[in-house]
Amino acid sequence: LETLPPEVRRHILSVAGLEQLQALVRASPTFHQQYLCDRRYILCSNLQGAIGPAVMTALSIYSHDPSKDMPGIVAPNARDQSSQTIWNRLTEDEAVGITGFYMKYTLPVVRHYSQHIWNNFIGKRSTDQAHECTGSELLRLTRAMYHFHQFGQVAGISSRTIEFDDWMSAMDSYIESMTSWEVEEMICVYEFVRATFERTFDAIRWDVDQNNPKFDDQHRPPTPDGAFDLAVEGRMYLNGTVLRGLPLLHTVLFKSHDHEFLVTTMQSHITRSAISTDGVVGIFSDTDQRRRYKRRPQGLEEMRRMSPLPFCGDHDISNPPLAWTTIWDGTISYLYGYYTSDESRKWGYVFWDAETLRSNGGVGLAKQQWMQIWNWRDPCDVIEEACDLME
C-alpha cells in the first residue's frame, strides 16, 4: 500500500471510515504523512459518512462557549443549507474537534445504546438473532445523540442568571428546529440516559448521604461537601445531572466498574435543576406542547387537514421512519412525548429501518403499543382532539 501513488493513498484515506482511518494512519508512516498533508479533506470525507446531516449540530456543540448567552447556543439545523456547503466551510480545527468528540464519546455511546434498544426489541419478539445496524439506522442514532447533548447545553443554561422567558423562548426555538420524529428520537435517548442515572443514584445513595460516617468531621449546617440529599431532592438532582450530556454518560457507562471512582465522579458532576421533561408541565408534556403550538398555529392547521406524510424509504433520514408514519396512519403529526408510547421508546421504534421492522414484527408492535395508550382510537381522532385543546 505504501508504494501506491499519493492520489490513490488520498482516496483510500478519504473513504476508509474513521476507525479504519485511525488504524491505517497509526500503522503506516507513509499514510500518516499523507493524512497530515490533507487532514481537513480526509476527515470531512469520513465524517460525512459517520454523522451525515447531524454536522450542524456537531459543529454547534464543538463551537459552544458556556460563558456566552443563550442565543449563541441555539443553532437550528440550517436545513436551507446544502450538506456540501456545510462540509466545504468546515475548518481543519473544526473537523479535528468534531472527529475527536465523535470517536471519544458519540460512537461508543451509539453502539452501547443501539445494542440496548435492540435487546429490548427482540425481547418483545422472542428471538435471539444479532443485528448490525444499517447506515441509515446509525445516522438516526448519531443524530439523536447530538440532539440530546445539545438539548442539555440549551436546557442547562437555565441555572445561570437569565430571564426565564428568554430561556423558554430558546428552548422552544431549539425543539421547533427539529421534526417531530427527531424530537421523538431525542426523547428515546433522554429516557435511556435518565434511567441510567437513576440506577447510578441508587448505587451511590449511601455514599453521598450526609449521615454517612465519612462526613462526621464536617460541621452542619451546611450540607457536607460531597453529600447530596437524594431522598428529598433526588428528582431535581436527576434532572440536572442528565443534562450533563455525553461525556458524563460515557464515563458512567464505560468507566464506572470501580465503585469509589464512580462515587467521586458523580460527586463532582451532580447538578441540581428544576427542569422537567415529564409530568403535567414537563418540556415534552401535553401542556407544554399546547403552549408551543400557540406560537406555531400553522402546524395545527396542517394536522387538522390530515395532510399526508407517507413513508418514502430509508435512503434519506430527513424523511420520517416507517414506525412513525405507521402510528399516525401516514398523516402529518407534530405530536410527540406525551402522545406516543413509553414502551415503544424503550426499543427505539423510530430508529429502525423498514426492513428491520418488518422482519421482526416491529410494525405491528409499534401500532399496537400506540393504540393501547389511546384505547384503540383512530389516530385522526387523537390529532383532532389535541388540536382542539391547543387552540
Image: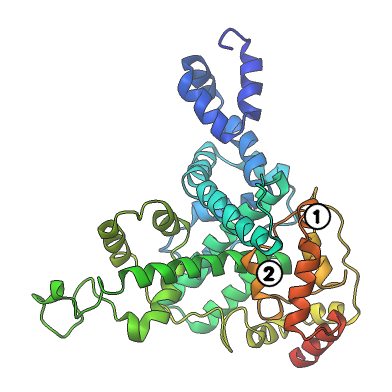
| 163 left or right of 211 in image | right
Would you name the residue on which mark 1 appears? 354
Count of numbered labels shown in the rendering: 2
Q: Is residue 76 visible?
A: no
Determine the residue positioned at 71% across, 61% down.
125
Q: Residue 163 or 42: which is nearer the viewer?
A: 42
Single out the residue that lies furthest toward the left: 217
- Mark 1 to mark 2: distance in Å? 15 Å
Q: Is residue 109 left or right of residue 321?
A: left
Which of the 4 image quarters holds residue 325? bottom right
Please provide percent x and percent y for residue 108.
51, 47
- Which part of the image, by quadrant, shows the C terminus? bottom right
Task: Residue type at mark 1: give it.
Answer: Ala
Q: Is residue 202 left or right of residue 345?
A: left
Task: Say which mark, if any, is on residue 344.
Answer: 2
Residue 165 at x, y = what percent?
A: 54, 83
Against 141, residue 270 (above or below) is: below
Relative to residue 209, is residue 59 depicted above or below?
above
Farthest residue toward the top?
3
Q: Quadrant of residue 344?
A: bottom right
What's the residue at 54%, 19% (across, down)?
34
Q: Residue at x 47, y 20 (%)?
A: 27
Residue kind at label 2, given as amino acid type: Ser
